[in-house]
Image (cartoon, rainbow, N blue to C red):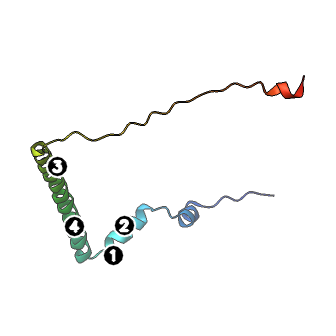
């Protein structure tokens, strides 16, 4: 029996690899509106991540400032003391070994 290996083109089709020809075809098919939309999306994404990071930092600064103004009272705690008693028995005494 002769083994037949798939060609490079068949492998790319089977496994979904992206070839340089595919990239070139996609670049030619892309419209200027799509490129502009992608750029706008990425800039808006970056801006929103930056804003959320700044908001978190501001909240942390506020929390640190507010925490120092709060009067700290001691907590009321309850202690539970558990005593363990170990009783040793001769379990074999009943059987008379």
In which image quadrant can residue 35 be found?
Answer: bottom left
Location of mark 1 (residue)? 29
Report the residue that reaches farthest toward the top.
97
Q: Is residue 5 left or right of residue 95?
A: left
* Above-or-below relation of 68 to 35: above
Q: Position of residue 95 (x, y in %)?
A: 88, 28
Label pair 1/2, CB-CB below 8 angstroms? no
Helix, strand or loop at label 3? It is helix
How far apart are the two marked residues, 4 and 2, measured between alpha carbons? 19 Å
Q: Position of residue 71 (x, y in %)?
A: 13, 43
* Nearest to N terminus: mark 4 or mark 2: 2
Of the image marks 4 and 3, the number of the one nearer the N terminus = 4
Asked if the residue under mark 3 is in contact with the one under mark 1, i.e. CB atoms within 8 Å, the reply is: no
Quarter of the picture containing the C terminus is top right
Numbered circle sitting on residue 39: 4
Q: CA distance from mark 1 to mark 4?
A: 17 Å
Relative to 28, is 83 on the left or the right?
right
């Amino acid at each position: 029996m002769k083994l037949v290996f798939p060609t490079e083109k068949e492998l790319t089709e089977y496994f979904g690899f992206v070839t340089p020809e595919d990239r070139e075809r996609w670049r030619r098919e892309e419209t200027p509106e799509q490129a502009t939309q992608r750029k706008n999306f990425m800039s808006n994404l970056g801006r929103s991540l930056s804003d959320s990071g700044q908001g978190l930092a501001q909240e942390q600064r506020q929390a640190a400032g507010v925490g120092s103004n709060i009067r700290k009272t001691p907590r009321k705690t309850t202690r539970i003391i558990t005593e363990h008693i170990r009783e040793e028995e001769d379990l074999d005494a009943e059987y008379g070994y």
